[in-house]
Amino acid sequence: MKLFKTIAVMMVLSSCAKKEVPDVPPTFSDPDWTRLEIADGREAHAVYGNIDDTLMVSTLTEIYQTTDRGKTWKKTKVNNQPIYGFLSVKDTIFGLQANSLKDKAGQKLATFSQYFSLDKGFTWDWSTKFGVSEQRSQAFASVSVNNQFKIKLKENIESFDGGPANGSGYVLKSDIEVFKNGTSKILPVPFDNQITNLHVDKLGRLYVSATRSIHDKNTGKYVSTEKNQPAIIYISKKNVRELID
């Protein structure tokens, strides 16, 4: 289904508005956000850790680490697919490789861990080699902040025929949805890249994983891609509460 969505987007929408988006976007500068890039990563997915210490990022096919605030990146594992979540259990980190299941409440899950790490993701080993269970899960692209509010990725689909999307259709730009005190709102962000995942560090900074795909800010439809092929991570400079309140 994901492949079908991607093909539909590329075939139907790629030629409709490319002239409206420059091949190379202007240098990103924003008072509230920092942008990091992993060259040739194409897509950023799961994030773990924090930018001041060790930051781990899953790209389209690999896992990278940075210990110098994104100046350099070390490739620590080749996956040949994204990791959709990093699950921390005591001193162990599990890489979750699927995101096709939902819980009873309809929350999408990151599941199934073939690999684990005991050193913050610098080295990885097979779960089955040591009899470690692969059956693990956590909420996908959903984070709680001090038990005060929740932030989730809202995936948007436009149906092919104008009716209900029912899980298939044109992939629009995803939103960041904030749930607080029984209400929800969309968090505005100063970028138009497709969003794939969310993470909050111990200081409350929000990490937004993104791809090089660019969407029209008004319609949410795909219009172009950045000329280079970076995996992109946007990081809030402040505690995310300051962006919401």
Image (spheres, rainbow, N blue to C red):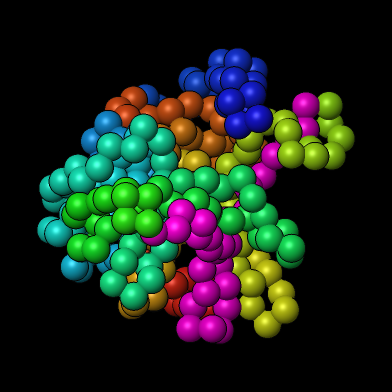
In-front residue for pair 223/153: 153
Is residue 157 a member of the stretch shown in magenta? Answer: yes
Left or right of 142 in this view: 155:
right
Q: Residue at x 77, y 33 (%)?
A: 159
| Residue 120, quarter of picture | bottom left
How far across and how far down the image is residue 17, in percent?
A: 56, 22
Please name the residue shown 38% across and 71% down the image: 89
Q: Is residue 130 above or below residue 159?
A: below
Along the viewing direction, whichever of 16 and 229 lies nearer the viewer:
229
Instruction: Please say whether residue 120 is one of the residues in the magenta stretch.
Output: no
Left/right placement of residue 125 relative to residue 192 reads left
Residue 226 in the image: above or below residue 135: above
Query: Is residue 71 shown above or below 118?
Result: above
Looking at the image, how many numbered discs can be counted on the residues? 0
As drawn, which residue projects farthest toward the right? 163
In which quadrant of the rendered image does the N terminus lie?
Answer: top right
Residue 141 visible here? no
Q: Position of residue 103 (x, y in %)?
A: 68, 60
Residue depicted at x 46% and y 46% = 97
| x then y, percent, for residue 32 | 36, 64
Q: Residue at x 50, y 21 (%)?
A: 18
Q: Where residue 42 sits: x, y (%)?
A: 36, 33
Res. 149 visible in picture: yes
Start-end of magenta stretch: 132-160
Q: Is residue 220 above or below residue 116?
A: above
